[in-house]
Image (cartoon, helix red, strand yellow):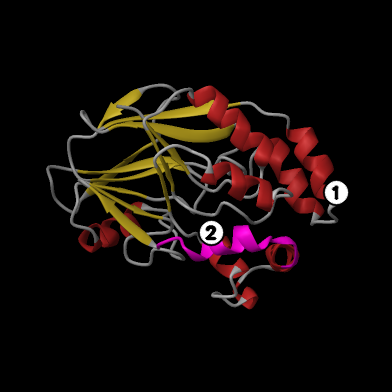
Amino acid sequence: MRILVLSDIHANLTALEAVLGDAGEVDAVWCLGDIIGYGPDPNECVARIRMLPKLTCLLGNHDSAALHRIPIETFNQDARRSIEWMQNVLTRDSYIFLYSLPERVVIDQVTLVHGSPRNPVWEYILDLHNASQNMEHFETQICMVGHTHLPIAYLSVNGGRELRWSVPNEGECLEISSRAILNPGSVGQPRDHDPRASYAIFYPETNGWEIHRVEYDIRAVQKRIRAADLPMRHALRLIEGW
């Protein structure tokens, strides 16, 4: 069984289509939130995600802000500008779909959230200390998160709260034998200085975890960002992955 794990699409339809084409046939799709925000294609990305087979989708912080659930003052100036634009262009169907999304889902031995198990929408897991603190906030063997835009795995040492981190090599299948927090990276706005879209394939029978990267037409997305009069910073960062 192959499960496609996506996060942080950020209204980048070109990257999303590249990932779906590269991943090929899958048995289910788990989307860890932030379908929208930053990019020029919010309604198109929501519509595409809704079409995917056996979809489980979570609410992200940008999704929540577009629903007026998070004050936009908590975001930086460029992000606020993007959120305000999305609040104006979201269709009723997109709004209803985002409104329906849960903040946390448990499937068998996997917990799914956007930010962290302690704070599903907003908290970033960026280091071993923070990851360790979050281990007591989920009961399953594995927790999958997004939000940081960084593909990384935090793995328990001998089953305890002591953790080590690992950045899996592209295409290498990491078999998860201990408790772990796993991040597939970002589809639409990678921040690990690799501009290629990032996603993961999860094999539940063996707890196998594979990170994959795929190139896409970044300049086409930049052109649409400029046409929508969105912040130029959101266009520039795509080319270098920051």
In the rendered image, the vertical position of residue 199 relative to residue 122, given as above or below: above
Q: Position of residue 102 (x, y in %)?
A: 40, 62
**Residue topped by disc 2:** 97
The residue tagged with tag 2: helix, strand or loop?
helix
Residue 180 lies in what quarter of the image? top left
Which amino acid type is marked by label 1? Arg
Relative to residue 7, is residue 66 drawn left or right? right
Q: Is residue 90 magenta?
A: yes
Q: Quadrant of the C terminus?
A: top right
Question: Which circle marks residue 75 in the picture?
Answer: none
Please tell me which residue is depicted at 25% across the width and 33% down the height of the picture: 204
Q: Which region shows up in magenta?
A: 88-102
Distance from the alpha carbon under mark 1 to that under mark 2: 27 Å
The residue closer to the viewer here, 55 or 37, is: 55
The residue closer to the viewer here, 9 or 234, is: 9
Q: Position of residue 199 (x, y in %)?
A: 48, 35
Q: Mark 1 vs mark 2: which is more N-terminal?
A: 2
Q: Position of residue 216 (x, y in %)?
A: 67, 28
Magenta stretch: helix, strand or loop mostly: helix
**Residue topped by disc 1:** 226
